[in-house]
Structure formats: structure tokens, C-alpha cells
Amino acid sequence: MPQTRPRVLIVDDDTTTIHIIAAALSSDYEVTIATTAGEGFRLATTVKPHIILVDVVMPQVSGFEFCKQLKQDERTHKIPVIFVSAEDTIRQQTKGFDIGGVDYIIKPVEVPILKARVKTHTRLYRQTLQLESLAATDPLTNLANRRKFDEAIEHEIERCQRNGNPLALLIVDIDDFKSYNDYYGHAKGDDCLVAVARILKAEAKRSTDLVSRLGGEEFGIILGETDDSGAMAIAEAIIAEFRHQQIEHVKANQAAYLSVSIGVTFVDFSRGGRQGVSIRTLVDTADHALYRAKDAGRNRIEYEYLEVPGKPH
Ligand SMILES: Nc1nc2c(ncn2[C@@H]2O[C@H](COP(=O)(O)OP(=O)(O)OP(=O)(O)O)[C@@H](O)[C@H]2O)c(=O)[nH]1
């Protein structure tokens, strides 16, 4: 698939420089312009540029301060920043790198050098993004993989705890999948995993939801900012969707179709506390509920609250 053109954000208060840089890059890049650091920061979070070219000397907020701000925000900290400045002292240039810039271009801008450097840094950044995405994705289902799940749940625990919000985790396991594989063959088993992934994605579709394949026929769904009734509603919708779709599984023991069992756990951070709430305790609690669902006959949901130790009552 052809890649879209890389996006460049130019942040400069000098219209002559903006004009020179934009003219040099606009045939190969999507160019966006900001004349203040404030506007630049807003565009960095919305346009998500592949590179930012910033003037060092600007009124109010300098290019260095702007870069520091970008590096402190998780939405923008990875975007490569190139400083463009007439200040050519070694001290000034070194400072640019220390702050987190990837390059420093001296004004007046030499267009071939500018183009070569922008090309190199955008290519490297895009490769990094691609590798990060591959490292976080399960190749069969295209869902987030276990590594991404662990990273995301840690992040969600922190976020929900900081904001005093509830957090829920669902572990979904296909019922009698061994006999499905044995009867229909491994390739059909793979197709089945893809179909299950699609159903789960369709039911947990909020931006704070993350559906992942934990391994084999087990899936994890993180529901940030979701309380017990919200999480149970999603779990019930998943069970109902499998009942509705009636995916054939002639060897199923319980239902006459392909079904899943779901273990659900909730944490309520609304009264503070966090000690003892880790990925491990969350997953273990949801797993425990899942085993109970399997034991009780499959094709069902069981849940367990996770108490937050140290929470004042
Ligand atoms: N096709 C396919 N099968 C897989 C994959 N990963 C794991 N499996 C199979 O999933 C099956 C899981 O079997 P079990 O752990 O015994 O679970 P189950 O038969 O679903 O039984 P219950 O969970 O108790 O209902 C095994 O046969 C694995 O070989 C995969 O990527 N593709």
C-alpha cells in the first residue's frame, strides 16, 4: 500500500523563513504552519506531524521551551524536532540536542541540506513507528498483543487511579477450542480466532477500551473509566452476540454453537489508594473469575471485585 505523504509542522514567527521552508518541502510533504509555540503545540497534538521544524528565537515561548514542552507530553514526545536558527554557536547547537532535538539547521537555510535532513529524519521516524506497531500487534488477529496489553493496563491503572475512576478487565476464553481445532483443523481454528477478535472489537469500541489477544484462545479487554454495570453490560453483549451469530461448533459440549466464557474484575479508585493493584493482581482476579465460569459450565460470565488495599473507608 503506498504510504501517505509525511506531515511536516513548521513553527516560526518569521514569514520569510516559513515561505522558504514551505516552498522547499511542499511537493513531498503535507506542510502545516504555526507562528507561535502555543499554536504549534496544538497542531502537534492534532495533526501528529512526522517532523517539527522550529525556530529557536520566537517571542513569548522560545523554540527550546517549545521543544521541552513537546518532550514532556506523551502525545508528542517521540516526534523528531529540528531547530532552525541563525544562532550558530557550538554552545547553542549543543543545547538544542541536549533538550531533545534531532538536528540543528543554520539560517540562512540551504534548501538541499534542509531537504536531505528532513527526509532522513522522517524516514527514520516512520520506520520506528512501524516497528513499534509490529511489536505491539498479534499477527493473526491484528489485535494488540500481550506486550501491548501489559503496557496499556499499567498505564490505565495509573490513569484511573490519578482521576479516581473505576477500571474493569475482562478475560474472554473460547469454550472447547481444542475440540474445534481437532474437528475442523488448525486453519479453520485460525479463522475462528479472527472471527472472535472481530466480535470482541465490535462490542468494546470506546477509545478507552483495548481488546488484545493474550495468547492461544484467550483474549483480554481493558475497559478504562468503566464501572461494574458498564463492564457487565459489555460482557453480556459479547455472550449474546455469540448466541446470535451461531458459529458452528458441532463438538461443543455446552452450547450448540461456538461460545466463550468471561471472567470480569473491577477496581474502584474513587476513594484513592493503589498499593497492591498491579497487572498481576488484576489479571489473577479476572482469571479466577474465568475459571469459575468454566467450572460452572462455560458460555457464561463470572465476576470478582478487586479491593484496593489501603483505601480509606
Ligand atoms: N488454530 C489455532 N489454535 C490455537 C492457537 N493457539 C492455541 N490454539 C489451540 O487452542 C486450544 C486450547 O485448548 P484448551 O486450553 O484445552 O482449552 P479448550 O479446549 O478451549 O477448553 P476450555 O477452555 O476449558 O473450554 C488448543 O488446542 C491449542 O492448540 C492458534 O493460534 N491457532
Image (tube, helix red, strand yellow):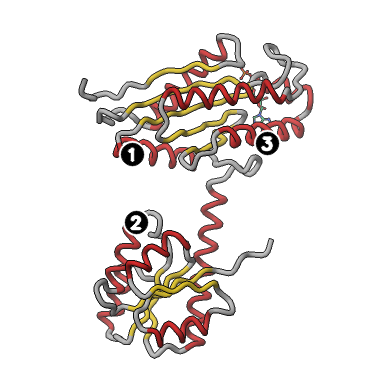
Q: Residue at x 69, y 23 (%)?
A: 244
Q: Residue at x 36, y 75 (%)?
A: 35
Distance Cα–Cα, label 3 vs label 2: 35 Å
Q: Residues within 10 Å of mark 1 (few under 14, many from 20)?
A: some
* Residue that label 2 marks: 73
Q: Residue at x 62, y 22 (%)?
A: 240
Rendering quarter of residue 65:
bottom left
Residue 194, numbered label? 3
Residue 137 image position (x, y, % from top left): 57, 45
Image-based side of 262 in relation to 109, left or right: right
* Residue that label 1 marks: 158
Amino acid beneath label 1:
Glu
Q: Quadrant location of ligand 1?
A: top right
Q: Are marks 2 and 1 in contact (CB under 8 Å)?
A: no
Distance Cα–Cα, label 1 vs label 3: 31 Å
Residue 135 image position (x, y, % from top left): 54, 49
Amino acid beneath label 3:
Val
Of marks 2 and 1, which one's residue comes earlier in the chain?
A: 2
Rendering quarter of residue 213:
top right
